[in-house]
Image (cartoon, helix red, strand yellow):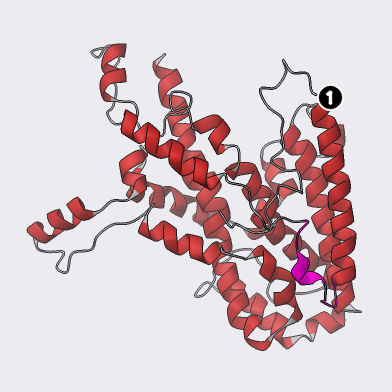
């Protein structure tokens, strides 16, 4: 019983702060800044291609700093009274409603960034790290593991879209190598003193590598974020299922189970706050992968129309599959990677 309380709480904290905020929101933020600095400033076509996948993300990061991670700063850190006053004024959601707290969360993120490499978090590479290798469609879990099934289809569609875009812009690898603006962008993304995206190729060597970079970026902002964000209400709104807070350590040799319920697990106030927060986080977006009307007058409009058609085909496949799922096998339909539902950017 104690393990059933503690392990889901730990998993919930890792999911929220690392898998969700760390591996999507905060991973993509420096890439957005680099694209603004090097591509937007000179109206490069690549910014037009990427900008729908950056929409509203920086605003959310700013809001997170004022809510999830907010802490007051004393003018004089050597003054104990000022430090105590600042601590009392700090109201971060991380400290109030999660076991890990803001400081520990940042330590966890630091460990993630220490080992981070850009291409390792593409769909197939990340699955390979968890033992899913070879022909994924022939994996024995393919039919039951719906994230694998739907994610693979979406990943491949994004890859084709990225390749079509690159082909529409560059006839040869040499053309790409000679694009000075593109190379400056790649340099800033990879620069340890700027965006610091380890493993990002600089200089950009060829068309295939650029396409893979775009595929990985768009997957992160769309499919990956959708897969880790939108199940939250279904699994976490009921706090006894996955308690976010664990307020006291449990010594099961001396403390009773009733003591744990009374003193350690999420309070009613925390449970209510979490339910409200994740309800907001899982509201549907009005800017999905199939709704990028801003691409209609761009030189790569044909590539997007082909992509949209592929996405609608995938959506139909998912809907047909979900309709056939036995009611007793799944508590609800797996819709999180239906392209008509997947936001194009991290906008919530």
For the residue pair 252 and 308, the one nearer the viewer reads as 308
Total labels: the figure holds 1
**Residue 32 against residue 68 in the figure, above or below:** below
Residue at 76 percent across and 59 percent down: it is: 291
For the residue pair 253 and 337, the one nearer the viewer reads as 337
Which type of secondary structure does the marked residue at label 1 adopt? helix
Q: Which residue is mark 1?
A: 324
**Residue 338 against residue 67 in the figure, above or below:** above
Kindly report the secondary structure that dominates the magenta region of the rendered protein. loop
Q: Position of residue 52 (x, y in %)?
A: 68, 66
Residue furthest to the front in view is: 286
Residue at 41 percent across and 34 percent down: it is: 244
Where, quadrant-wise, is the N terminus in this rendering? Answer: top left
Q: Is residue 120 visible?
A: no
Q: Position of residue 114 (x, y in %)?
A: 50, 56
Label 1 neighbour load within 10 Å: few <14, some 14-19, many 20+: few
**Residue 31 against residue 130 in the figure, above or below:** below
Q: Is residue 117 visible?
A: yes
Residue at 48 percent across and 40 percent down: it is: 14
Left or right placement of residue 259 versus residue 39 in this view: left
Left or right placement of residue 55 versus residue 68 in this view: right
Q: Position of residue 101 (x, y in %)?
A: 34, 44
For the residue pair 104 and 35, the one nearer the viewer reads as 35
Residue at 42 percent across and 29 percent down: it is: 243
Q: Which residues are magenta?
A: 290-300
Q: Position of residue 194 (x, y in %)?
A: 52, 75
Occupied quadrant, residue 34? bottom right
Left or right placement of residue 103 versus residue 283 in this view: left
Is residue 212 covered in magenta? no
């Amino acid at each position: 019983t104690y393990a059933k309380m503690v392990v889901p709480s730990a998993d919930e904290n890792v999911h929220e702060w690392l898998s969700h905020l760390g591996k999507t929101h905060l991973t993509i933020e420096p890439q957005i800044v680099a694209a603004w600095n090097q591509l937007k400033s000179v109206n490069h076509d690549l910014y037009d291609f990427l900008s729908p996948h950056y929409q509203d993300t920086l605003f959310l990061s700013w809001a997170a700093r004022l809510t999830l991670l907010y802490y007051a700063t004393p003018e004089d850190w050597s003054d104990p009274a000022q430090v105590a006053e600042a601590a009392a004024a700090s109201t971060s959601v991380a400290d109030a409603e999660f076991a890990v707290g803001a400081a520990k969360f940042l330590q966890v993120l630091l460990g993630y960034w220490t080992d981070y490499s850009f291409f390792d978090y593409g769909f197939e590479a990340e699955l390979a790290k968890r033992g899913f290798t070879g022909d994924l469609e022939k994996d024995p879990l393919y039919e039951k593991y719906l994230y694998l099934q739907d994610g693979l289809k979406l990943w491949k569609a994004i890859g084709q879209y990225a390749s079509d875009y690159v082909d529409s812009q560059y006839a040869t690898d040499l053309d790409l190598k000679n694009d000075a603006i593109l190379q400056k962008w790649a340099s800033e993304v990879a620069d340890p003193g700027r965006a610091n995206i380890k493993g990002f190729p600089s200089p950009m060597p060829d068309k295939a590598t650029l396409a893979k970079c775009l595929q990985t970026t768009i997957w992160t902002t769309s499919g990956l974020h959708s897969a880790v964000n939108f199940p939250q209400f279904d699994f976490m709104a009921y706090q006894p299922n996955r308690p976010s807070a664990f307020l006291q350590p449990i010594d099961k040799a001396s403390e009773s189970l009733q003591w744990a319920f009374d003193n350690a697990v999420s309070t009613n106030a925390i449970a209510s706050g979490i339910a409200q927060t994740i309800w907001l986080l899982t509201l549907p977006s009005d800017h999905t992968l199939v709704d990028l009307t801003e691409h209609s007058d761009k030189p790569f409009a044909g590539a997007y129309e082909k992509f949209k058609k592929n996405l609608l085909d995938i959506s139909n496949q998912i809907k047909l599959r979900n309709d056939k799922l036995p009611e007793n096998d799944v508590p609800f339909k797996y819709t999180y990677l239906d392209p008509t539902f997947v936001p194009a950017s991290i906008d919530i």
